[in-house]
Image (spheres, helix red, strand yellow):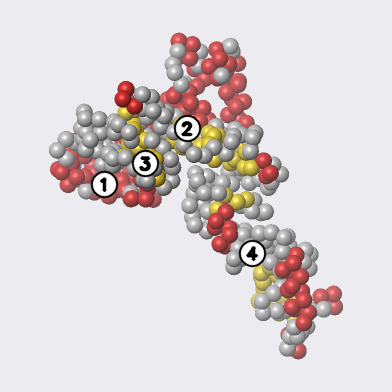
């Protein structure tokens, strides 16, 4: 649809349309998706001459890719580096804020051992098995989701292919299989080749096998050319604003994308508390990145998020948000039990008329509560989710007795 729309507009109209899209989706990954989609779409005379509005971003992305090449030099380049140049590259990696700690440690380790690694390589720039269709590449064998029924795949996905990891040139059924045995994360979008598990031929990544003997064997029912993702079992859709594949039937069917939170939410959560880019953070319990996590995520009443499984485990012993300390649900029954408990409890006489200054975590108001060693009730909202802000006790006024 995009090529048809842009071909019908003037250059000025194209620029205005793109600016409007980018302004409306500034908190999302839509611009990233637009660039990846446009660069991956078939080129035609019209698309090359009438789409300059898209040309600036790919050029910028290309410059980023080139700068990233500094951290992945060829074996010959590394072998020719002197000690000062190697130390300089290591410092560049160490100072790069865009690299996650695992990736940074992996790159530094490889640079520090590069001379030894390069000396072990007989053919530094020639991938083993390039001419024989994949034989000799680590992982060049089929894997099965169900060995008895001979169904290809792994514990995570059912699919008929393996992916050739661009980072280490090894074959894995999915990125989770790669990350499980590697000290770095796999960049799935950088994947350019796959191996059909029927014919064991390495070929450009795509929805079907290109080997004549496989007769167009489908790699999976669902294939995303942007994420390089295959799935043969579940309903999956690609969200252009997340620029990721999500589980579900699709936007407007069972999910919608919140432009403020920059995440896909179920249709039941149309009314929710928005926080800008709230999912682009780590789970406060397991510390996994929520935005790209494949596990179910739960929205808390305060607007924060955590994994559903983490929520179930955490609420067995806690009832407040680990980030902002607000209550995780309707605590009326629990607070009523505390009311009854304190009413039946008698404090020593020297503490009965003492009060403490408190701050309520639920309503964020400061107040005064009767002295207790553990429980302090907010006089404004009735919550016991409070904390003492002044340890010294004072004599209660008549209104607090």
Q: Which residue is mark 3?
A: 150
For disc 4, the neighbor class at 10 Å (few under 14, some 14 to 19, many from 20) is some
Label 1 – label 3 distance at C-alpha: 38 Å
Taking the spot 55% from the left edge, 12% from the top edge, the residue there is 7
Left or right for 314, reference 342 = left
Query: Which label's residue is closer to the chain start, 2 or 1?
Result: 1
Helix, strand or loop under label 2: loop
x, y percent for residue 184: 35, 47
Query: Comparing marks 2 and 4, which lies closer to the viewer?
Result: 2
CB-based contact (under 8 Å), mark 2 and mark 4: no
Label 4 – label 1 distance at C-alpha: 45 Å
Q: Which residue is mark 4?
A: 319
Q: Which residue is mark 2?
A: 221
Helix, strand or loop under label 4: loop
Q: Which residue is mark 1?
A: 110
Please say whether residue 359 is visible from this viewpoint. no
Query: Which label's residue is closer to the chain start, 2 or 4?
Result: 2
Query: Which label's residue is closer to the chain start, 4 or 1?
Result: 1
Query: Comparing marks 2 and 3, which lies closer to the viewer?
Result: 3
Label 2 – label 4 distance at C-alpha: 42 Å
Q: Between 166 and 364, which is closer to the camera in this rendering? A: 166
Taking the spot 41% from the left edge, 32% from the top edge, the residue there is 219
């Amino acid at each position: 649809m995009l090529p048809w729309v842009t071909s019908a507009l003037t250059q000025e109209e194209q620029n205005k349309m793109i600016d409007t899209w980018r302004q409306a989706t500034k908190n999302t990954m839509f611009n990233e998706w637009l660039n990846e989609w446009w660069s991956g779409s078939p080129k035609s005379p019209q698309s090359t001459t009438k789409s300059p509005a898209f040309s600036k971003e790919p050029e910028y992305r290309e410059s980023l890719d080139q700068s990233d090449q500094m951290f992945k030099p060829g074996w010959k380049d590394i072998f020719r580096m002197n000690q000062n140049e190697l130390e300089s590259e290591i410092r560049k990696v160490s100072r790069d804020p865009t690299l996650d700690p695992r990736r940074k440690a992996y790159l530094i380790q490889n640079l520090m051992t590069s001379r030894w690694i390069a000396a072990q390589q007989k053919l530094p720039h020639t991938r083993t098995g390039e001419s024989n269709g994949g034989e000799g590449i680590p992982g060049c064998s089929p894997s099965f989701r169900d060995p008895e029924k001979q169904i290809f795949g792994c514990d995570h996905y059912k699919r008929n292919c393996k992916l050739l990891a661009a980072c280490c040139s090894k074959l894995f059924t999915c990125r989770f299989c790669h990350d499980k045995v590697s000290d770095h994360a796999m960049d799935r979008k950088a994947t350019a080749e796959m191996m059909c598990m029927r014919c064991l031929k390495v070929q450009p990544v795509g929805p079907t096998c290109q080997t004549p003997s496989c007769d167009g064997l489908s790699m999976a029912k669902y294939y995303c050319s942007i994420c390089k993702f295959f799935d043969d079992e579940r309903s999956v859709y690609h969200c252009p604003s997340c620029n990721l594949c999500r589980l579900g039937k699709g936007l407007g069917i069972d999910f919608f994308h919140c432009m403020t939170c920059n995440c896909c939410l179920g249709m039941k959560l149309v009314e929710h508390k928005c926080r800008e880019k709230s999912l682009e953070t780590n789970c406060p319990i397991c510390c996994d990145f929520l935005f790209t996590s494949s596990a179910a995520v739960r929205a808390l009443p305060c607007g924060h998020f955590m994994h559903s499984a983490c929520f179930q485990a955490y609420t067995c012993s806690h009832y407040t948000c680990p980030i902002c300390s607000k209550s995780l649900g309707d605590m009326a029954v629990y607070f009523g039990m505390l009311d009854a408990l304190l009413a039946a409890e008698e404090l020593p006489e020297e503490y009965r008329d003492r009060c403490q200054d408190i701050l309520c975590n639920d309503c964020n108001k400061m107040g005064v509560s009767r002295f207790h060693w553990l429980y302090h009730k907010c006089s404004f909202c009735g919550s016991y989710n409070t904390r003492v802000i002044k340890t010294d006790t004072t004599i209660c006024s008549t209104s607090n007795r």
